[in-house]
Image (cartoon, grey):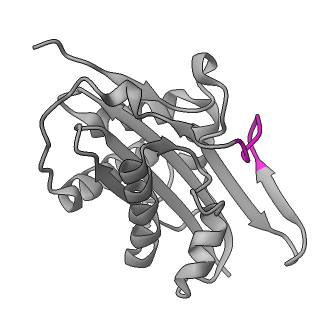
Amino acid sequence: MKRTALLTLGLIAVFATAVSAQNTSFQNQTALTVAGRGNAVESPRIVKDMAAEVKASVFVNTSAVERSAFELLNRKREENGLKRLVWNDDVAEVARQHSQSMAEFKYFSHRGLDDSMVSDRADRSGTLKWKSIGENIAFNRGYKDPTEVAVRLWLESPSHRRNLLNSEWRESAVGIAVAEDGSYYFTQVFLLRK
């Protein structure tokens, strides 16, 4: 069987059409700062046709994969002299819902189909009071270890690496969804509380 692999991360030189590392801070409740290159408000990229070759559905215990990704990310932080992030179930739900939306509707973007960004989704949850919030997203298919691939490519991308290795973050979580075609959608949300 031909192994098909798709990797999509914004801000990699080849695919630099969208920002896929988002970092938003409210300095004084009125000043919104978005870090990164490119335009974070571009329309979502549709991935339907790119994922058409895999025919079978895939069952994956996404909770186990989410925790595995989170543990790998924390190891990378420790290797760089940083404190481990604390898993937050409310943050996980925000991340998971975005990954599920991307998988279900076959798009890849920080901006949801309802035009929301991570800050909007966190506010809508009603449980997250944050001072600073950030997000990394990844999409891939056809790899034996999709988590390792997503984390490795995040670390190779300057803006994703800045998010992952930002000493400001205290809490985080990873939300993963797997589409029927076997495509993995990853969302990691970073949080600093007020």
- As drawn, which residue projects farthest toward the bottom? 126
Magenta segment includes 56: no
Task: Relative to 149, say whether 184 is above or below.
Answer: below
Task: Return the x and y of residue 145 as percentages of the image width and height.
Answer: 21, 33
Task: Relative to 166, say whether 192 is above or below.
Answer: below
Q: Magenta part of the protein: which range?
A: 35-42
Q: Nearer the viewer, residue 33 or 161?
A: 33
Q: Which of the 4 image quadrants contains residue 53?
A: top left
Left or right: 4 as drawn, with respect to 99: left
Dominant secondary structure, magenta: loop
**What residue is rendered at 23% in x and 52% in y?**
65
Task: Return the x and y of residue 186 as percentages of the image width and height.
Answer: 39, 48
Residue 168 makes an appearance in the image: yes
Q: Nearer the viewer, residue 82 or 141?
A: 141
Residue 87 makes an appearance in the image: no
Task: Return the x and y of residue 170 as percentages of the image width and height.
Answer: 53, 68
